[in-house]
Amino acid sequence: MEKKAITKKPQIIEKRYLLPFILITSLFALWGFANDITNPMVAAFQTIMEISVAEAALVQFAFYGGYGTMAIPAALFIRKYNYKKGIILGLLLYAFGALLFLPAAQLELFSFFLISLYILTFGLAFLETTANPYILSMGNAETATRRLNLAQSFNPMGSLLGMFVASNYVLTSLKSEARDEAGNLIFNTLSIAEKAAIRTHDLAVIRNPYVILGVVVLVILIIIAFTQMPKTHLEDRHNDNARDSAKRLIRIPKYREGVVAQFFYVAAQIMCWTFIIQYAENIGIPKAVGQRYNILAMGVFLSSRFISTYLMKYFKSSLMLTVFAVGAMITTAGTIFIGGMFGLYCLIATSAFMSLMFPTIYGIALHGIGSDATLGAAGLVMAIVGGALMPPLQGKIIDLGKVAWLPAVNASFILPFICFVVIFWYGRRALKRNY
């Protein structure tokens, strides 16, 4: 009797890639920390610098604007050299931007903090443009999206640490957040001299975690610099120029639509996590406590990321993206129209549905594009600029105080709702194309 050959399913991570996979995956946690220690700074700067929500949201404009500026130069650098050199340069820029918080706090200039964040994200643009396609290329193409989802699962671990530091060290240590028995900010009633002293103290509180982060990044840079990183098939020398690569990419519908979907996904994520504090404040919850709800949202996000990565073994990634987009639309609608604590819990639940979106859009968009993946990754990283452009717009809506019969902060979540509609559209299109 003839024995049937048993076909083994390809491994998510091959043994030869295990060490580089671990090192590159640590970078996902590293930029997760930067993302989510920065989100609560919008609310902190709003009080300390006595500015509007829209002006404070320029923190996100500077942070995510750095991605839009540096993604293409990062891709061109990586095409000329290799992934490892791209990572090293990214870590250098990351550390430099973080350490610039020292003079920014000394000068007490909001604009200097924005410049520091802008340069910091030059480094993050290099890291994301490098790490995502590198992870995709570490093994069989069939398991690439699952592999990226696994690596991206460590991103919220860094995010949780960033949120923890923000909640338990930064926000609770801000003297500008002290309130009287009626719950009103004492800071608003102080003299100019008293405010100046508190401002100096609070900006130092904000500065310290970024300076420590800069030192940690330099240590990781040294470790990676002295570790041998294997070349993958995507690091072969290119026989054509970047313009030819860009022309090919723009002709691929799932790629160019993926860039659009990624723009709206990042915008939705940043809005949901940045303004959860303002949403909580609107129902009488102080900033530091509101940040704990943000930590809860990230915990939900992290759990759902691992669960969805496992489910991808049985369901198409495009189907899961479509279903999760519908779930996010439902919970966001609850945030807008129901309000109160139930609306806040709906906002937290939205994180469960956002969990698989970034890496899945990324994986679908880059699947099967070969050596164009490096430049393709840059386009998807540039799409992160959605996180720069839409939060200030949401801030402007919140500053209105009221929109029709709704509190303005509730109404402002119509923007994330629209974003999830776009992601649903992309998921449906990808599903019809059998991705």
Image (cartoon, rainbow, N blue to C red):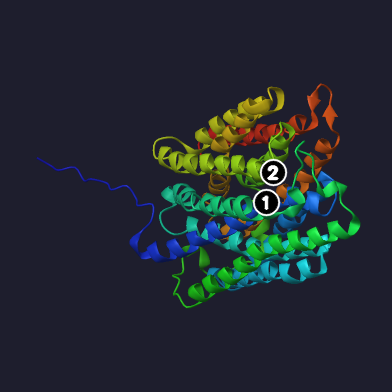
The amino acid pointed to by label 2 is Lys
Q: Going from the N terminus, do you reach mark 1 or mark 2 first?
A: 1
Residue depicted at 53% across the width and 48% down the height: 363
Circle 1 Cα neighbour tier, 10 Å, few/some/many (<14 / 14–19 / ≥20): many
From the viewer's side, name the closer residue of 342 and 434. Answer: 342
* Location of residue 192 (image quadrant): bottom right
Whether residue 160 is visible, yes or no, is yes
Residue depicted at 40% across the width and 65% down the height: 19
Alpha carbon separation for disc pair 1 and 2: 7 Å
The amino acid pointed to by label 1 is Leu
In the rendered image, residue 301, in percent from the top left (x then y), is placed at 53, 41
From the viewer's side, name the closer residue of 178 and 241. Answer: 178
* Location of residue 115 (image quadrant): bottom right
Dot 2: element: helix
Circle 2 Cα neighbour tier, 10 Å, few/some/many (<14 / 14–19 / ≥20): many
Dot 1: element: helix
Q: Is 129 situated above or below 343? A: below
Residue at the front extreme of this rendering: 181
In the rendered image, residue 420, in percent from the top left (x then y), is placed at 65, 34
Q: Are marks 1 and 2 in contact (CB under 8 Å)?
A: yes
Q: Quadrant of the N terminus?
A: top left
Decide if residue 196 is on the left or right side of residue 347: right
Residue depicted at 77% across the width and 67% down the height: 104
Residue depicted at 84% across the width and 38% down the height: 399
Decide if residue 56 is on the left or right side of residue 295: right
Q: Which residue is mark 1?
A: 171
What is the count of numbered marks? 2
Q: Which mark is residue 287?
A: 2
Whether residue 271 is visible, yes or no, is no
From the viewer's side, name the closer residue of 308 and 282. Answer: 282
Decide if residue 380 is on the left or right side of residue 106: left
Residue at the right extreme of this rendering: 192
